[in-house]
Image (spheres, rainbow, N blue to C red):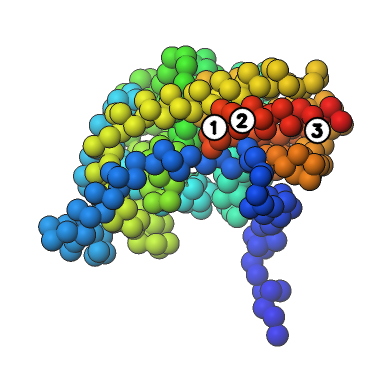
Amino acid sequence: MSTHELFATRASRMKASEIRELLKLLDQPGIISFAGGIPDPVLFPAEGFSDAFQAALGPEQQAQALQYSVSEGYVPLREWLVDHMRSIGVECGLGNILITSGSQQALDYLGKLYLSPGDTALVGWPTYLGALAAFNAYEPRFDRLTINSNRGAEGYAAAAGEGAVKFAYLSPDFANPTGETVDLQGREALLDLADELNCAIIEDGAYQALRYNGDAIPPVLALEQARKGSIEDCRTIYCGSFSKTLSPGLRVGWVVAATPVISQLVLLKQAADLHSATINQMAINQVARACFGTHIPMLRRVYGARRDAMLQALQDYMPTGVQWTKPEGGMFIWLTLPVGTNGADLLARALETVKVAFVPGGAFFPDGSGTNTIRLSFSNSDEETIREGIRRLGEVLRA
Ligand SMILES: Cc1ncc(COP(=O)(O)O)c(C=O)c1O
């Protein structure tokens, strides 16, 4: 006898996506894929990791590397992060940092910490699919975060009804899926809104280090700290990740926030997985210290050239009526197709006829709208392949 009638109500909100089924075809030979937002494995600092794991398993570090450890995370890595956060404008101490198993785990914990069923989470329309999935398990309502609009705090509060607005989630630098950046004015406006609503801000910095042109804009947390003085008075919670810069497979991310938030997250981590893998944190620490300063500029050069190649190819091959974003960093370009063109249908056709893959945009909208959008990633193909893939995509769109 099956037990599936016994699942909690949250389970009914978790759905496998049809797109994943289509994307299983990616293993076929000859497919050009702009689907996954993943780093190019050729660019991993593999030698550095090999040395780091050897050292961690050597006589001096082995006992610590293979043993249980504290939930907050490996101290030398948190010390490096204190300096790293300072370099992007945030002053914090060790007690303000928790290491997580990827930033995805931080999103799950923050959903668990803030959302009771029926509470409101403000998110972009579209927004990162993994954030929607993480928050969705805690049965919130999603409302559309529109920065710099006429919609004031009362508008959000009224729409939220009885369930309060608990947080606004956004990725202000080169967002997944649009590649867009929130400007300084937008970040300041967001802080005003959050103060009025008395809600938290979850700042997802997954792509923050990957800027290819233009001037860096301070993180929302840095701007809030400039207003309020101490991180302890800030409502912004910064989630960082080594996945896009050093390695996603090691699953190391971090959270920076006021101590009461970190203390509560530590309790959640103790209940969920005790701590992130110590040996992975040690390896990330060693590699970050050895090469972050040279590795990031290299990634910026390589990914920047790929972005340029994709923008040029779109210019050369897209039919009129197709629009796209011009990101200053990250891994994605977002296309808006003429109204009536369905991104999921286009994917099915593109896979079958020209062997090109991408992600239809509808999945990134909490209400399933945006069906005439698609997300292209430029991070994992060389320039020639990018040009050929976009040429083929143009062909299908014209057909
Ligand atoms: C915007 C954004 N946030 C968070 C993540 C999760 O990354 P990780 O858990 O590997 O740190 C991703 C991964 O694609 C992402 O695109």
Q: Is residue 199 left or right of residue 83?
A: right
Establish whether ligand 1 lies closer than 8 Å to the Cβ of label 1: no
Query: Quarter holding the C terminus?
Result: top right
Q: In the displayed structure, would residue 98 be above or below residue 385?
A: below
Residue shown at the point (30%, 28%) measured from the top left: 294
Residue that appears at 34% across and 41% down: 45
- Asked which quadrant contains residue 70, the reply is bottom left
- Residue 382: numbered disc: 1
Please tell me whether residue 260 is drawn above or below residue 332 in the rendered image: below
Which quarter of the rendering shows the N terminus? bottom right
Mark pair 2, 1: CA separation = 6 Å
Residue 25: x percent and y percent?
69, 52
Query: Marks 1 and 2: in contact by CB < 8 Å?
Result: yes
Mark 2 lies on a secondary structure that is: helix
Mark 3 within 8 Å of ligand 1, using the beta carbon: no
- 52 with respect to 106 (left or right): left
Answer yes or no: is residue 32 visible. yes
SS for callout 1: loop
From the image, tell me which residue sits under label 2: 386
Residue 322, given in percent of the width and then of the height, sits at 77, 22
Percent coordinates x, y for residue 216 in the rendering: 42, 18
- Is 389 in front, or is 176? 389
Would you name the residue on which mark 3 appears? Answer: 396
